[in-house]
Amino acid sequence: MTRVLSGAALLLLMVAAVWLAPPIVFLVVAELLVLLACREFGALATASGLPIPVAVSTTGAMLTVASFAPIALRALFWAPVDTVLMTAMVAVGSVSLIRWRGERDAIAQAGAAVLPILYIGLPVGAMVAVREMWGREALLLLMVAVAVSDTAQYYTGRRLGRQPLAPSISPKKTREGAVGGFVAGALVLVAVGAFWLPQAPWGLRALLGSTLVALGIAGDLFESMLKRSAGVKDSSALIPGHGGVLDRIDALLFAAPIYYVVLKNL
C-alpha cells in the first residue's frame, strides 16, 4: 500500500508540475530533481570506490539545465549550453586535479566527476527545453510513453517472461517484457501523439515510440549497473517503496535527449 500511495502522489506531482507550473517554477522543480539525483549519484560513486567532488559536479549539472531555459530565466544570468558545458568540464577537471593524492584510479575518478553533468544535467535540460519549445503536451507525451512502456514491460514479463534480457545486471527483466514495452510505447506515440505531437507523421511517431522504449530500457539497465557496482538495491530511500530519484527517472535520462533531438529536427 505504501508503494501504491507514494507512486500515486509522485505521479500527481509530476503531472501537475508539467501541466500547471509557470516556466520558472518548472525550472526550479527540475533543478531540485537534479540536486537530489546528483547527491544519489555521488553516494553511488563513493560506494564504488570513486569519491567525486559532488558539489562541483552538481553545480555543473544544474547550470547545464538552466542553459536550456532562456524563457524561464528571461535571459537573466543565462548562457548557451556549449559555454556552460565547456566551463563545467574545465571546473570539474580542475577540482579533480586539486583533489588527487596519487591514486592509480585518477582517470576513473575524473570520469565519474564529469558524468553527472552528461548523465543527469543534459537529459533534464532536454526535458526543460521540450516544454519551453514544444509545449507541455510534448513533454507529457514523453513521460506517458516511458511510464506506460515500463508498466507494460513489468506485467508482460510477469505473465509471459521466460528469457532473461540482461541477467547479470537485472535478472527480472525479460525479452518478452521488452516486446510488450515496445508495443505499448509505439501505441502511445501513435494514438496520443496524434493530439499532442500532430506535426510528426504516424510512422515516425511509431518509430519514435519504439526508440524511446529501447532507450528507456538502456537507461534502466545503466542505472542498475551503477547500483550493482556500488552494491546497493536502490539509489536512495527517499521515495517510500520506490527507492530514489534516479530509480524513478533512469529511463527518461536516456530517452529525453534523443526525443529532444528528434523534435528539434521535425
Image (cartoon, grey):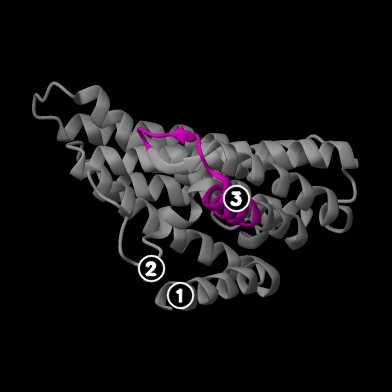
Dot 3 amino acid type: Thr
Question: Which structural element holds mark 2?
Answer: loop
Observer able to see residue 80: no
Separation (CA) of disc 1 from disc 2? 7 Å
- Residue span colored magenta: 147-169
Q: Are marks 2 and 3 in contact (CB under 8 Å)?
A: no
Residue 14 in which image quadrant? bottom right
Is 228 positioned to the left or the right of 13 in the image?
left
* Residue 151 at x, y percent in the picture: 59, 56
Q: Locate residue 15: give its quadrant.
A: bottom right
At x 52% / y 52%, what residue is drawn?
Answer: 158
Residue placed most toward the observer, 205 or 123: 205
Question: Looking at the rendering, which quadrant does residue 34 occupy?
Answer: bottom left
Find the distance from the CA under tag 1 to the CA under tag 3: 23 Å
Amino acid carrying label 1: it is Ser
Residue carrying label 1: 6
Residue identifier under label 2: 241
Q: Considering depth in this image, is 248 or 241 the residue closer to the camera?
A: 241
Foreground: disc 2 or disc 3: 3
**Which mark is first along the chain, 2 or 1?**
1
Q: Is residue 166 magenta?
A: yes
Q: CA distance from mark 2 to mark 3?
A: 21 Å
- Mark 3: few, some, or many residues within 10 Å (few <14, many ≥20)? some
Q: Residue under label 3, please give it.
A: 156
